[in-house]
Amino acid sequence: MPKEIPKNMAPISQDGITRREFVTRVGATAALMAGSVIAARSLWQPNHFVPGFEKQRGLQLPSYALALDKLLPSMAIAHGEAHEGTIRAAIGALGGMGRFIKRGDVVMIKPNVAFDRPPALAATTHPDALRAVAKLVFEAGASKIIVADNPINSPAGCFLKSGLTAVASEMNLELMYPALKHFSPLQLDGEILKNWTFFHEPFKNANKVIGLSPCKDHNLCHASMTTKNWYGLLGGRRNQFHQHIHSIVSDFPLMMKPTLVILDGINVLMSNGPTGGRLSDVKRMSTIVAGTDMVAVDSYGYTHLLERNLDELTYLHKATERNLGNCNWKDSFYKEVQA
Amino acid sequence: MALLQKNKPPGGNRHSFVRTPIPVSENLICVVLLVIIAAIGVAIFLKGRHFDPDRFNVKVSSLNSTSSSVVGKSQTIAATTEIESDSTKDSTKSQTTPPRPMPTESPAASTETGGATDGEGGVEGVGARSTPMVKGEPLEIVLEGMKPMSPTEFYNADNLYEKIDGRSPAYQNFHVQALRCRTFAVTSLPGSFVDVYEYTFDSAVDAFGMFSLERDPKGKPTDFIADGYYGDMGWFFRRGLVYVQIIASDQNLQTITLAEALARNRARELPENDHGLEGRLMLPTKGLIPQSVSFIPDNAQGQAELRDVFVAAYSFDGERIPFFIMAAKPDEASRAWKLFHDFCMRFGKVEDLPDVKGSKIFSAQLFGKSKVVYVRGGELGGVFDVSDVNKGQAFIEHYLRGENK
Amino acid sequence: MINLNQLLTLRNTRRVAQVFFFLLFFFFAFVTDLRYLKGYPVSLFLELDPLVAFATAITRHTIYMGLMWSLLLILPTLLFGRIFCNWICPYGILHHFTGWLIGKGRAQERERIEANRYKKLYGLKYVILIAMIAAAVGGTLQIGWLDPICLFHRTMTTAILPAINLFFPSSVYVQQYFHTGAWAIGFMLFILVGMNVLIPRFFCRVLCPLGAFLGTLSTFSLWRIDRDVTKCVDCDLCLKNCEGASDPQAQLRKSECFVCFNCIEDCPEDALAFKFLPRLQNEISKPAVPARRFFLGSLIGMAFFAFGRASGASGRNYDKKVIRPPGSLEEKEFLGACIKCDQCIRACPTNVLQPAGMESGIEGIWTPILNMKSGFCEVNCTMCSQVCPTGAIQRITIEEKTGTGLFAEEGPIRLGTAFYDHGRCLPWAMETPCVVCEEVCPVSPKAIYSHEVTITKRDGNTITLRRPFVDPALCIGCGICEHECPVTDEAAIRVSAIGETRSRDRRLLMDGGVTSSVRDLEKRDR
């Protein structure tokens, strides 16, 4: 039977709801439905992984290179007898160390200390070269210099016997030996180097990087100069790369963009590299090459210091093809001086 | 108001009310829902039949007893593929042997973790991934004016790269077996030292091969050993199966004197062995350019049959003549000669020369250079890379007539 | 004559659905066994559970594999409302059935009507839901305590099925299974189900967080119960069988309505109908939770997370007994992914998996850990990882677990490392030969090796026996040695959680491979 409608109930106008209400309600529900489908789809993990065995996301190094200065040369070749004088001349031709190093910078110098050879055998960075570069860097106002390398065998012995420990204590440089916690996985979109453990600690606080390498024959990749120098920063079982030595060395200009590289060609290891061992393997070429493009510097070193045919040096050509440098050093703005 | 009073039904349970009529649409919806439910059931049934048996099927065989012959640790690690050398300490223990009986002391000797290897104690888990230890006799040399600066280091072919990095493949090509090295400090000169490197190869021939590969053409011959030379900072020689390098850190008199003493010591102490070097002995001495002897294990001059070849350079008639010689069985030698002959015919000009004392000779010009190759019995040899073929031919004829001994 | 028209009502269809899904649930519970599993999707209910998908999306930032199925429930809920609660949810069906059987199902009509009125207490489930979501935002997943599917699966696994097997031996297991803490889990279910005597559908109305979640979603439902006030005579008969206590006789609470269609059947005036977009004036659409309750709930949830983590059981102070199944995530992530459904425990063929107590802290209660006294981890088995719905145990393959085939370079998954107790080991301490452990060690080469020793016994005779050692580089922590050790009260070789590969900081040794710079660095100490 019909009844009175209580006052608190709304009057029944008609059966349906307003069109506006229809649209808002259906729209809200439809939006929620679509939203949940989209959210679920984007968050979906359709494949499993094995916990603990994931490839770690590695770090990437920032670039330590400065912007190209069209007014100053990017490569300098200096001829002279003494390390300090010739290095000064080369850097001076580039515009002075002040072009690269500013007051307060923390500079990481990467020498080649792969072996425990005495300095006269030119298998490692010469202590006089490190001393000269450190002097110039401090003169430019750097607050700290870190020197580090990862020779696989006995870093303390290698630094000592190559004479660099003495320079480090004399010039008050921070010598950093590799330790377990100093390594981090590096991530790179390289030809061979994708994800590998890397001696990262020396770079953590550095804002400038200088590569200081000798000029050496190498029985696997023909020459070890400023590009191959960065090999020393890799950890792990890096001998695996011997089979792909040209590919991996061409990855180095991608991995590392230093502020400056210096090739010590005062004494050059002409044969039986990289270890050398005889004084007769060493030839005095009395040259220092400094530049911002390690590929260009190496191309000069191979042709003029090791006196060989550049066609052999596959990794330089690979690097040039990948736009990581220019193996025609004459294309760059260079200056040749006498110390 | 009475009208607002709830029209309550009488108390107690009534029979369930049955709603009529039920709209046909509801019936149809019910049918659809029932069909959906049935479909779900069928789908689950079918899903149950499709599965990958390997995914989670326990392999029944693995539930069998896992007992197998129980041997000591060195046998149980035979299957590891990764060879690493943990040449940590100087120790006179020899290479791994089947398990030695443990000492009869109390178990307190082992650590609580129970993973101790060879009684060295401590949780040596780190790095002790069951590898055969590369050990050997420490390099103990007692000489005046020096003392050891570091312990002896040992390496095998697989971890040699840790010491000499990119140079190691060159050594591995000659089948290096081990490196033993040590540094000795010069007591009178702080900071000066001498490195002693001893590379052991699998044969005297291979040791010679590596030695000659690194030979300094300007090195001065040593007087205390035949296969040796020295330079301004080092002594290098082959003795037996070992290629020795003595490297001084500087050119101070005390350092060099010590280095020479060490070289003489090693040349004396290491055992002699010239097995397989017979070919070298066949090399004529007259006109031999010093320090030019080298050894090519295989593929000499790009020929697969030319292996274990000794090469030396001679000064003859104002010219530098490279000469090679291979010692083999007669049928191998003549076969290699024939193949070499045919190869030269394909790629260059060949002239068959008259026999000299029973040896067959041909000369060839290809790729701008000339060769003259002979074979007699089990000996195959010749000159190569000469610009003047006549001089080359003359050299060979002299040699075959025995005039070049 | 069967009147199809009368028979094919929505209420009857619902009953068919209830029987079907309840039997399906029991089927899944029974068939989660190595012998019968085949390809059946035994975790389907958990994968359909929208709260599981939602909460794991918050903690893990992903929807793991099969959890996409929950869309199949979310979309109909957004259309029709809480159909899950009365049509599909096996726990709800259990409560519905129990309520009918022993609750007010047969009581006087008036009593039943009063029992089904809405009470303010029914807002508690929303606070519980908010607390659980807040805890998930912090990073710990605690929905498993009260999510009905998780709860029911867990009780089936740990309490009900073993109980059935106790009374009917070999009906469920080959050998009787035992689970630690089964009494608590079993009684929890009994108490909750027993509460139906006092309040019908107690759990579903008062505690169920999934119901709260679905109730929140049904605010937007397009189909709703609509009461025609012109026809309604206020007899309250619709409340007689109302499952959800949604007050259809007054202002309908859509978030409580279970869509059981009982009210439609019971109304003598035909005043109720399930309509598309009815007017909302006679309705309370949103859940009735005041803002301060909302705030309180989130505070409790956050506090649970914070206090739980601050107790430190998942950090450095980890318990060595927390050995997780193979394929498990790293501990903190595991606690953010495990819904305590114990499906893995059900699937495990050796009964080694047990619901944890406080070993992994309060967050880890009822999560699975291995107890080697009870069983061991069969090397060639990944059953637990196949049934885990959330990816707390990733769905690994046997190759990945054993480090064979494509994964030979990476090596096997290690659960832990075995350590000897020299005071208990027979050859070490009791002059008695044994080495059962070495015999049963399943890896090749064996992780247990022994050295021969000749000792003089107490009676003066000599004896030669083998004393065992563990190589931690080879041990995978499977626990067969501990399980088979004849010293059964506390084995002389015991597996401990250190060395597990899932956790970077609990590794005993480096893994080799790419990061073996450590190996090279170790050699520098020459």
Image: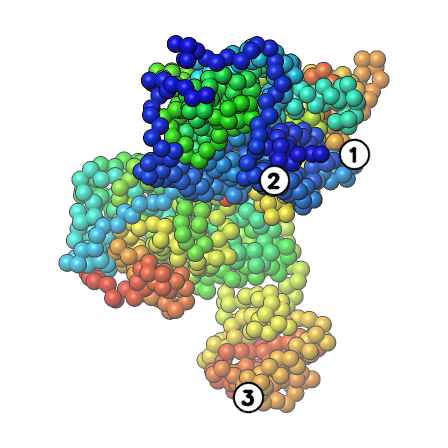
Q: Residues within 10 Å of mark 3 (few under 14, many from 20)?
A: few
Q: Which mark is residue C278?
A: none
Mark 2 packing: few (<14 Cα in 10 Å), some, or many (20+)? Answer: some
**Which residue is denoted by mark 2 in the rendering?**
B31
Disc 3, SS: strand
* Mark closer to the observer (3, 2): 2
Near-viewer residue (B10 or B306): B10
Of callouts 2 and 1, which one flags the residue occurring earlier in the amino acid sequence? Answer: 2
Question: Callout 2, which amino acid?
Answer: Val
Q: Are marks 1 and 3 in contact (CB under 8 Å)?
A: no
Q: Residues within 10 Å of mark 1 (few under 14, many from 20)?
A: few
Q: How much space separates mark 2 and mark 1, taking CA atoms?
A: 57 Å
The residue to which callout 1 is attached is: B65
Q: Residue at x 18, y 55 (%)?
A: A69
Q: In the figure, residue A249 lies in which quadrant?
A: bottom left
User: Can you see residue B174?
Assistant: yes
- The residues bearing labels 1 and 3 have C-alpha atoms spaced at a distance of 73 Å
Q: Kindly state the secondary structure of the residue where label 1 is placed.
A: loop
Viewer-nearest of discs 1 and 3: 1
Q: Which residue type carries mark 3? A: Lys
Q: Is residue A129 above or below residue B21?
A: below
Q: Which residue is mark 3?
A: B349
